[in-house]
Amino acid sequence: MPEYWLLDPQSQWAEFYQRDERGRFQHVPPDPQGIYRSRVVPGFWLRVDWLWQDPLPPVDAILLEIGGEAYARRLIERLREQGWL
């Protein structure tokens, strides 16, 4: 396992760990903007405060923010394939 997350929604606490080159897990805090970037899933990142929003942010809004134009193009392509557009 190259990475793991510890999340506690009640206390709104999150910690992220990634395995280093020696095989040891190191704590990796979110950046100053509160974003955690995965090394396991290329291009995936997470605004930690999304986890604590009530109500949770819409999935499509998050996917558009993370995936940007590439996600939007793929979504349009899939909608066309399904006959929705």
Image (cartoon, rainbow, N blue to C red):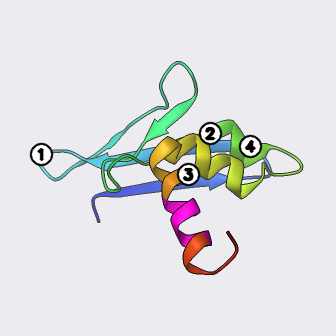
Query: Which residue was labeled with disc 2?
Result: 48
| Structural distance between the alpha carbons of marks 3 and 2 | 23 Å
Provide the secondary structure element on which disc 1 rests.
Answer: loop
Is residue 68 in sight in this rendering? yes
Towards the viewer: 77 or 70: 77
Disc nearer the start of the sequence (4/2): 4
Q: The residue under label 1 is which amino acid type? A: Glu
Q: Position of residue 43 (x, y in %)?
A: 37, 46
Task: Name the outermost residue toward the left.
Answer: 22
Q: Are marks 1 and 4 in contact (CB under 8 Å)?
A: no
Query: Which residue was labeled with disc 4?
Result: 12
Query: Which residue was labeled with disc 1?
Result: 21
Provide the secondary structure element on which disc 4 rests.
Answer: loop
Query: Which residue was labeled with disc 3?
Result: 72
Disc nearer the start of the sequence (4/3): 4
Front disc: 3 or 1? 3
| Structural distance between the alpha carbons of marks 4 and 3 | 30 Å
| Structural distance between the alpha carbons of marks 4 and 2 | 9 Å
Q: Are marks 3 and 1 in contact (CB under 8 Å)?
A: no
| Structural distance between the alpha carbons of marks 3 and 1 | 35 Å
